[in-house]
Image: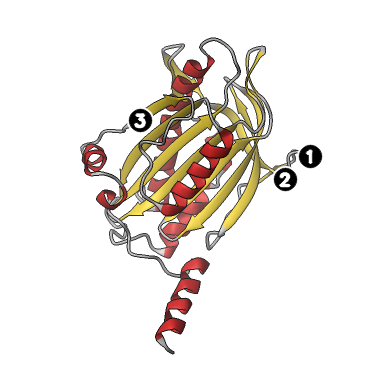
Amino acid sequence: MNRRAAVFFIFLLLIAGNISLPAANPEDLLDNTLATALRAGEQPSAIQFKNGNLVLMPRDENLVRITENIRKNLNPGVITETLYLYEKPAGADKTGWTQSELAALYNETIALGTLAGIQYFSASRNAMRTFYESSSVIDNPSAKNPLPDPRFSVPARELIIYARQKDLTFGDNIYEYTYNYFPGALIFVQENLTNLKAGIFTAVRANNLRSVLAVMDAGEYLLVYAVSMAKAASLPGMNDRIGSSFTNRAQAILEWVTSGADRAFGKDN
């Protein structure tokens, strides 16, 4: 096999998900200030208005392409970002996730039924509150028949699933989730297919919210990045309210990812 053929063969294996690239370190993906803050236990977050630049996004070409494409096409009025560094437990592969760890982690992130009952801190109520009262995968946005959470032995390169989720703030809604697997990264995008209502008001119209969650292998760690971008209704203070709400909700999602990672890496075993 000549060199060109060998390189092409390795590329095909990577696309198929049969082997992994060496894991990056946090410093490879972030500037030193952010990496240092994460290693010290901080969880950086940012809120911007009027389609600002993404300031916490890790240096991953697929993540940059996906999120920047959304930002440019959506032209959001509010953007919230959050970063989290998850330290892999003892017994996990610290040179890069194994295929079994990757498959387990992937299945945890597509288990949308497990979102039911998670809690977040409500700034308006100054108390913990249920995020999703119910959450289930459905067959399609029209029939809305519930399905069990899917499972895969090998992550799909791209997967689209639909979910019905009852949010105690924004009501009972239908979402589309697009999952992407790249060597070293799991990236999924949530899009609202129905209007998000706050009481009698429509806070975010259908297709005007995108939330991106990226879970990246970083050697001894997982680097988790969450960003929500939305066009809010033209009501006084709505952008501020949504920005604060989405930041607190991102924390709940990060804790959900952490619990899933614990199970994927066998921390509780």
Residue 143: where, in percent of width, then height?
Answer: 79, 39
Q: Quadrant of residue 48?
A: top left
Position of 70 with respect to 105 (left or right) is right
Q: Quadrant of residue 207?
A: top right
- What residue is at 42 percent from the left and 88 percent from the top? 2
Which residue does the numbered mark 2 point to in the structure image?
Answer: 139
Tell me the tag on residue 143.
1
Q: Is residue 150 above or below residue 112?
A: below
Q: In the rendered image, is residue 125 in sight?
A: yes
The kind of residue tagged 2 is Asp
Measure the C-alpha gap from mark 1 to mark 2. 7 Å
Q: Are marks 1 and 2 in contact (CB under 8 Å)?
A: yes
Which residue does the numbered mark 3 point to in the structure image?
Answer: 45
* Labels 3, 1: front one: 3
Q: How is the image coloured?
A: secondary structure
**Nearest to the observer: residue 30 or residue 18:** 30
Q: In the rendered image, is residue 114 in sight?
A: no
Residue 164: where, in percent of width, then height?
Answer: 66, 35
- What residue is at 35 percent from the left and 46 percent from the top? 223
* Most distant residue in the bottom direction: 1
Residue 159: where, in percent of width, then height?
Answer: 61, 53
Q: Quadrant of the N terminus?
A: bottom left
* Mark 3 vs 2, N-terminal side: 3
Q: Are marks 3 and 1 in contact (CB under 8 Å)?
A: no
Position of 145 with respect to 205 (left or right) is right
The kind of residue tagged 1 is Ala
